[in-house]
Every structure is written in C-alpha cells, then in structure tokens.
Image: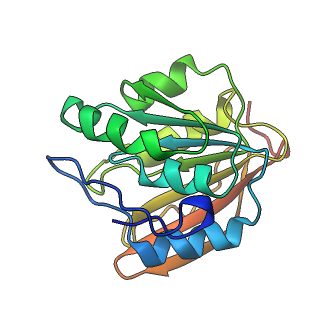
Amino acid sequence: MRITGGSLLGRQVKVPEGVIRPAMDRMRESVFASLGDLSGLSFLDLFTGSGIIALEAASRGAAYVEAVEMDPVKRKTLLENVKISPVRINCRFMAAELYVKRAKRRFDFVFCDPPFPYRYKWDLIEKIARSPLMGEGSRLLLHRPREDFHDGKLPFLEKTGSKEYGRSVVDLFYFTKNGDFA
C-alpha cells in the first residue's frame, strides 16, 4: 500500500498479518480530496489496522492523530508504519467500543472502518455521536459494505453524502445539535 497525498505521497506502508481489508488507494485519495485541507485539525482512525488512514491524515497536515486497533497481531506493523509520520500518531490498543466509552477528547474528524462482518456498526455510530468525540463542526466518516445501510435518523448526525467504491461505501456525517435525541 502507498500513501496517496500530502507530504508522504508515494511512501509505502506495510500490511499486517491476519485478517485485514486495507482501504483501496482510489478510495483513500477520493475521500481525503473531499475533506480538503486538514492543517491544524484533529483526526481519529477507529479500527486502524495498518494505520494507513491515520497516516493519510497526518500526511495531509492533521496536527493531532490517534489510531485505535484491538488486534494484537497488527500491533508491531502499526507501530512500525506510524514511524514515518510527520506528526506523532498516538496508537491506542483496545477495542473501539471501549475507546468510545472512555472518550474525553473531541476530534474534527472521526473515521470508522469496522470489519465488514461487524454487526454493531450503527450502534457504535450512535455511541460515537453521543460521546465527547463529536462536537460542533465534527465530521464522521463510516466505511461500510454497500448492502449494510441505515435508512433512519441517527442522533446528532446529518448525513451529507455517500460515495461508492466497488462493494464499499463511505458515508459522511456532520455533527449537529439539532434533533430530539437525549
């Protein structure tokens, strides 16, 4: 895998052993192009795997980046990959659900890329929206299989777009205080 933009453009990233579904170059390039300039912003990568999304954010100027991964098999490769980052990427080795539950810090961007068979993604998205991770101006991106969609309202989130990449979709949500969600 290679980084598709920013100061690390073209740098190679190792793929960890075990079950992994790395985000396609084309998808990463398109998603980050749509986000615009990340200079000075904060970025959270949940279910990071190799750390490629966190590295893409750091490469494009994000000032504070955290990567969360539970699988101990991926730990060594993730720590090796993030060494090339122009800013420190803070790696947290725990379940994404536990990270969200313990969250205290707000992020400008939260990228959630659970394994495609993960059945609790919409519950986790609701928990993220209700957590301190999201605040005024925060955006949430969800990478999911095309067939796993949510047609209802989500608390505090307004869906502003979706892009398809083969069998996968990336949804973009803005945090909003509007709504009857307590």
Residue 26: image x %, image y %?
46, 78
Tell me the quarter of the picture where residue 153 sits. bottom right
Q: Position of residue 17 (x, y in %)?
A: 15, 47
User: Which residue is drawn at the image coordinates 77% and 52% (left, top)?
Assistant: 39
Is residue 47 visible from the viewing direction of this image? Answer: no
| 58 or 159, nearer to the observer | 58
Which is nearer the eye, 90 or 83? 83
Which of the image's four quarters has the N terminus?
A: bottom left
Spot occupied by residue 112 in the image (x, y as percentages of width and height) = 49, 48
Image quadrant in which the C terminus is located: top right
Horizontal and vertical percent position of residue 31: 58, 69
- Left or right: 90 as drawn, with respect to 167: right
| 54 up-or-down from 143: above or below | above
In this rendering, position of residue 72 left or right of residue 112: left
Q: Is residue 167 above or below residue 37?
A: below
> What number of labels is visible?
0
